[in-house]
């Protein structure tokens, strides 16, 4: 299981990386926004994308839309981990095809639960 | 007709008469008319105008004399930006120190866990008398090594925990810095209100720009941010109502 972690704050990337490793996912890579993530996604054979929403360059939502519009990547499971917590934003993300939505600040338990749920569904 | 407009009407008439006298060059009569005009009508109105004029004058003078406005723009605001930048640096350093200490501790804890699990297995064999003499001396050597590693690793863990502890020192400092910036913001707010008062315009009703999508960021208690969810449970409820 190869996972790409996208967040503009390096500390949040480190936290996610450590939490994912604790959950048994040690094969992770990092990108600091959508623009950096996009070429990595295209060539990196990732199985899962964990992304922040509000980032310079390209936001997580735009990255999500771009992934869903790409024939090669469209089925990639995506979890948004973000501080954005307006109802309309959550609905927007859902309509754009997100697989899970975690609001910051979050706990290790929440992250684990959402990831498990995503993989149950994706199979 | 209201009282004020009656007074104004009278004064208007008198002012017209004054203009007529001045145009006719009847200066003496005009002077009398000026006196009449200034005494006429509602003296309270004049007093009020006088008071407002004086207040305005004082306010403008006060505003010009208040050198802190210059300080605010020259040093206050740039200083605040630097202070806040420093807060970002400090919190980021602290987070990285903490994360490094935790990352360094995890493998030590894993070793402790694995080591003791192995020993428990062997130990249980020993207590149920399933160990040969040779196996027992191997176990005893293993215990010896493990105890040494526990001592070493505990010391390292202790050091790492102290590092985590010390990395929290940012809170006090950033708290003080942020308080100072809050004071500055209040100061600027007051000055702006003063400025608006002098210019005489009313504060317009608070209106938020709509249209362009703005990312609000984290929910801040006490700050109105529209229709937001307050917990992960609410996110889950909303998503499940959408068929997730």
Image (tube, coloured by chain):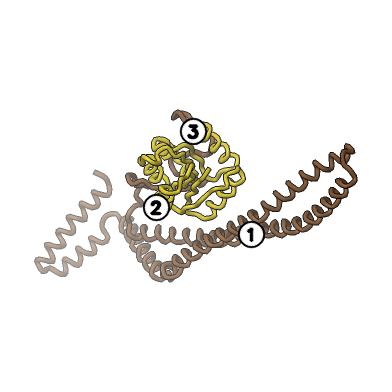
| Residue at the spot 59% in from the left edge and 62% down from the top edge | B173
Nearest the eye: B146 or B62: B146
Q: Which chain is brown?
A: B
Decide: few, some or many residues near mark 2? Use Cα within 10 Å; few <14, some 14-19, many ≥20.
some
Q: Quadrant of residue B120?
A: top right
Q: Are marks 2 and 1 on the same chain?
A: no
- The vertical placement of B151 against A117, above or below, is below
State the separation of the CA atoms marked 2 and 3: 26 Å
User: Dot 2 lies on which element?
Assistant: helix
Mark number for residue A122? 3
- Give percent across and percent down for residue B206: 37, 47
Q: Is residue A63 left or right of residue B151?
A: left
Query: For mark 2, what is the residue?
Result: A35
Q: Can you see residue B184? A: yes
Q: CA distance from mark 1 to mark 3?
A: 40 Å
Residue at 44% across, 61% down: B188
Q: Specify the colour of chain A.
A: yellow
């Amino acid at each position: 299981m190869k996972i790409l972690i996208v967040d503009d704050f390096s500390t949040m990337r480190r936290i996610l990386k450590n939490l994912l490793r604790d959950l048994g996912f040690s094969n992770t890579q990092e990108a600091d926004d959508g623009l950096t993530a996009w070429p990595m996604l295209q060539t990196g054979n990732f199985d899962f994308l964990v992304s922040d929403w509000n980032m310079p360059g390209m936001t997580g939502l735009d990255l999500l839309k771009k992934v869903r519009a790409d024939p090669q990547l469209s089925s990639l499971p995506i979890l948004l981990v973000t501080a954005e917590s307006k109802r309309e934003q959550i609905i927007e993300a859902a309509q754009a095809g997100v697989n899970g939505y975690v609001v910051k600040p979050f706990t290790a338990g929440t992250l684990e639960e959402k990831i498990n749920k995503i993989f149950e569904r994706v199979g | 007709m209201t009282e004020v407009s009656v007074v104004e009407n009278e004064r208007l008439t008198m002012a017209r008469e004054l203009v007529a006298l001045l145009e006719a060059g009847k200066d003496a009569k005009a002077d009398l008319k000026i006196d009449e005009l200034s005494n006429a009508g509602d003296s309270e109105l004049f007093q009020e105008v006088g008071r407002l004029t004086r207040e305005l004058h004082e306010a403008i003078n006060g505003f010009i004399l208040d050198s802190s406005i210059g300080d605010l723009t020259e040093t206050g605001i740039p200083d605040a930006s630097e202070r806040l930048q420093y807060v970002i640096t400090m919190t980021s350093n602290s987070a990285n120190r903490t994360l490094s200490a935790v990352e360094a501790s995890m493998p030590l804890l894993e070793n402790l866990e694995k080591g003791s699990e192995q020993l428990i297995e062997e130990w249980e064999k020993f207590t149920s008398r399933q160990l040969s003499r040779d196996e027992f001396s191997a176990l005893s050597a293993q215990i010896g090594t493990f105890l040494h590693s526990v001592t070493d690793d505990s010391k390292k863990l202790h050091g790492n925990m102290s590092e985590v502890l010390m990395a929290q020192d940012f809170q006090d400092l950033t708290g003080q810095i942020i308080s100072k910036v809050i004071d500055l913001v209040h100061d600027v707010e007051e000055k702006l209100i003063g400025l608006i008062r002098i210019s005489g315009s009313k504060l317009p009703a608070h209106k938020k720009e709509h249209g362009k999508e703005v990312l609000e960021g984290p929910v801040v208690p006490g700050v109105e941010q529209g229709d937001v969810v307050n917990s992960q449970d609410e996110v889950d409820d909303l998503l499940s109502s959408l068929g997730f």
